[in-house]
Amino acid sequence: MIPYVTVEEASFALGRNLTWLETVWFDYSATKSDYYLYCHNILFLFLVFSLAPLPLVLVELARSASGWFDRYKIQPKVNYSLSDMFGCYKDVMKMFILVVGPLQLVSYPSIQMIGIRSGLPLPTFSEMLPQLFVYFLIEDYTNYWVHRFFHSKWGYENIHRVHHEYTAPIGYAAPYAHWAEVLLLGIPTFMGPAIAPGHMITFWLWIALRQIEAIETHSGYDFPWSPTKYIPFYGGAEYHDYHHYVGGQSHSNFASVFTYCDYIYGTDKGYRFQKKLLEQIKESSKKSNKQNGGIKSD
């Protein structure tokens, strides 16, 4: 809760006038408890889980109906109907109501303990950007090892196999998992803010961006115009799709965001071998077509 009664009092304490955004934040949050503000995260997660995959649903339906977007579908033999995707969404919402939402409600003491603040001043863009970058790096590294554990015999059979029911992933399948996996993967997500705590708004943005990134990597489509293709060492949909395609036997592409862990620890060899093999097949096919095209009949 902001410890000021008026905007003027807040401006005097900061030694400057509030920015427009800080004034909006003051008007909204000044009389609300930190716990109430933290629980907004439930609403943001609900909106991300519900709305972010919708464009991918439209793409999948358009592709199934007319063949549009076929060239971008990573596993083109797999088609999902509207009922298939809605069924996945319903399962995700059940997990959200039973696990994700309650977890947010009871985890506030940890937010207090690590010192995430909700008052003024608001963080600047130059403050938020490096914090978010650190959060992604920490989550990516810790998630890598948790994910490798899930692909042990016990971890896969008892927990992770649920997530791999979708061998050709779709956007709504990003948070589709066993309840224990949802809880355990919350640890890597929380570690960044715990190590480098910032403002509540930065925390909200981090949670939203992480889920949007997971939805993008589970999209099932490799769009050449995706801005993530310009991020160094970023895995993306095509990279993670291979992991789902191999399924329970997969010991490759464990990374959640970047690819450096898989490269360092040698867990991308199967993926790189298959990619090289496909490139050779495509090249041979091109050469064959050129040769056949050059033959003239009498």
Image: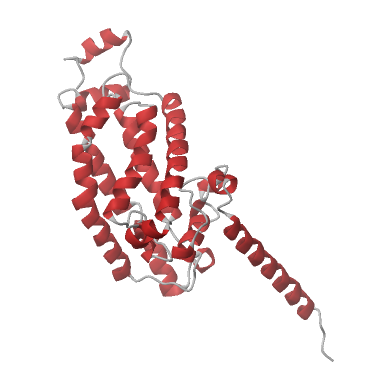
The x and y percentages for residue 261 are 54, 45
Q: Residue at x 42, y 27 (%)?
A: 125
Question: As rendered, which of 22 and 234 lies closer to the eye?
Answer: 234
Q: Is residue 116 visible?
A: no
Q: Is residue 260 left or right of residue 147?
A: right
| Outermost residue toward the front in this view | 154
Farthest residue to the right: give it: 298
Q: Position of residue 9 (x, y in %)?
A: 21, 10
- In the image, residue 105 lies at what x, y percent? 19, 39
67 sits to left or right of 57: right
Q: Is residue 26 above or below residue 59?
A: above
Quadrant (top left, top right, bottom left, bottom right) of the C terminus: bottom right
Identify the residue shown where x is 36% and y is 40%: 189
Identify the residue at horizontal 53%, vertical 52% (top origin). Answer: 225
Q: Quadrant of residue 21?
A: top left
Relative depth, front residue between 6 and 174: 174
Task: Indicate the position of residue 221 as horizontal and vertical percent values.
Answer: 48, 60
Residue 157's place in the image compared with 5, above or below, is below
Q: Which part of the image, by quadrant, shows the N terminus?
A: top left
Q: Quadrant of residue 78?
A: bottom left
Is 39 placed above or below 251 here? above
